[in-house]
Amino acid sequence: MGPLVIVSAAANLALVVLALAFLVVTWRVLAGPTLADRVLALDMLVAIAIGFIAVIAVKTGFTLYVDIAISLGLVGFLATVAFARFILSRGTPAPGAGEAALAGAGAASGKAAKAGKGGKKKQSGKQAKGRGEK
């Protein structure tokens, strides 16, 4: 058994394992209960794609694929950071809080928005005196 046969068999095995991982992670992207789970799964999909590219680079001997994998890694990292910032700015509830917490938060923010649009609220006597108004 020569080294090329061993490398080819290992590459084929790696492609099969990566394909299985790709299917499992794709299921997590579609079913993941929270947005954070989906973001992590998307990051994992990028890592699996990098693995595919690296295995193909080894199998074909074409080294340009390694540069493509590095570039994909950088883009994937930036996308993950952007998604993480989005999740933080959105202020999602803790896992397990359920849809009731989301509905309550939406109702509360809707009430606050309506109260802010209704014009000036009546001020109490202490607030009016503090501003020099009566």
Image: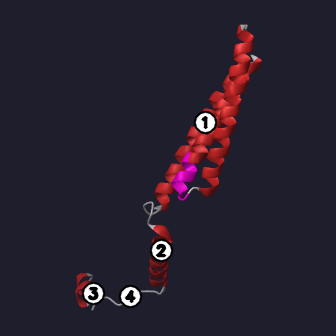
Q: In the rendered image, which residue does mark 3 sit on?
A: 128
Q: Nearer the viewer, mark 1 or mark 3?
A: 1
Q: What residue is shown with label 2? A: 100
Q: Going from the N terminus, do you reach mark 1 or mark 4 first?
A: 1
Q: Indicate which disc residue 121 carries.
A: 4
- Between the C-alphas of marks 3 and 2, the distance is 39 Å
Q: Marks 1 and 4, how far apart in space?
A: 54 Å
Q: Please give the residue where the numbered disc 1 appears in the rendered image.
A: 47
- Foreground pick, 16 / 128: 16
Q: Which segment is the magenta one? A: 33-40
Q: How many labels sit on residues?
A: 4
Q: Is residue 34 magenta?
A: yes
- Residue 59 appears at what percent x and percent y? 74, 20
**Closer to us: mark 2 or mark 4?**
2
Tell me the amino acid under the disc marked 2: Ala
Residue 63 shows in this picture = no
Q: Position of residue 72 (x, y in %)?
A: 65, 34
Tell me if residue 13 comes above or below residue 101 in the rendering: above
Q: Are marks 1 and 3 in contact (CB under 8 Å)?
A: no
- Image quadrant occupied by the C terminus: bottom left
Asked if the magenta segment contains residue 25, the reply would be no
Query: Does 43 sit left or right of 8 as displayed?
Result: left
Say which of 76 and 18 sits in front. 18
Marks 3,2: beta carbons within 8 A? no
Q: Amino acid at mark 3?
A: Ala
Q: CA distance from mark 2 to mark 4?
A: 30 Å
Q: Residues within 10 Å of mark 4 (few under 14, many from 20)?
A: few
Numbered circle sitting on residue 70: none
Query: Which is more N-terminal, label 2 or label 3?
Result: 2
